[in-house]
Amino acid sequence: MNKMNERLKRFRGGHRIASLFLFLFVGMFFIAGLSGCESFSRKFTRHKKEPLKPEEMVLEPQQYNNDQRSKEEIYREYCLYWESWQNEFIDSLTSDTPNRKRQADNLKEAIKNLMAMRDMLDQQRQDLLGAYITKLLDLETAISMDIYNASIPQHRMRAEKLKRDILRIFSYHRIKDYVR
């Protein structure tokens, strides 16, 4: 049995050496493969970064002319903006799925443009347009109180009537003499 153990030990030792040689051979082959491929070696080499050149800021002050538009153009622009926001508001009331935020935003923009129109008119017309603005604000309150959207048709009719009345009285061709 002694002889058999010695042979077995030699076999195991030889096996270790063979596996070591195999491992070294595979490792050398792998390293040679990596170093031989130019794109691979280029990929893993560190390149020096060039420092970024700071860009020179050239600040040139610009002077903008004041608004060169006439009062007529400005009034017409505000009137057009108001009408488009009012139409958007009415459309949001007639849609199948009413969106409360959209309704509120459209109405606020319409009121903002009406206030800008009011500031361009004489005192008597300002008071008259102020009454319509108050009616729109009341409509805004009524819509915010209508939680279940039960009165949407009534709100839409009020909004359309206010639009007709404001256009009838405050369109530019009727109010041009009162714009200041």
Image: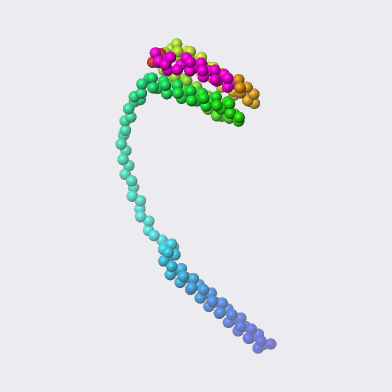
Task: Give the left or right position of residue 93, taking residue 76 as reference.
Answer: right
Magenta residue check for 171: yes
Q: Given the current orientation, which residue lies at the most extreme top position? A: 124
Q: Given the current orientation, which residue lies at the most extreme bottom position? A: 3
Tell me the quarter of the image containing the C terminus: top left
Visual colour scheme:
rainbow
Task: Give the left or right position of residue 168, taking residue 142 as reference.
Answer: left
Q: In the image shown, does 56 or 88 lie closer to the viewer?
A: 88
**Magenta residues (range):** 155-177
Q: Relative to residue 90, is residue 7 depicted above or below?
A: below
Tell me the quarter of the image containing the N terminus: bottom right
Task: Give the left or right position of residue 179, taking residue 103 as reference.
Answer: left
The image quadrant that residue 139 belongs to is top right
Residue 29 image position (x, y, % from top left) = 48, 73
Magenta residue check for 3: no
Residue 106 image position (x, y, % from top left) = 52, 26
Q: In the image shown, does 12 or 178 lie closer to the viewer?
A: 178
Residue drawn at the location 41% of the way across and 66% of the way down? 38
Residue drawn at the location 51% of the way across and 18% of the way down? 164
The image quadrant that residue 73 belongs to is top left
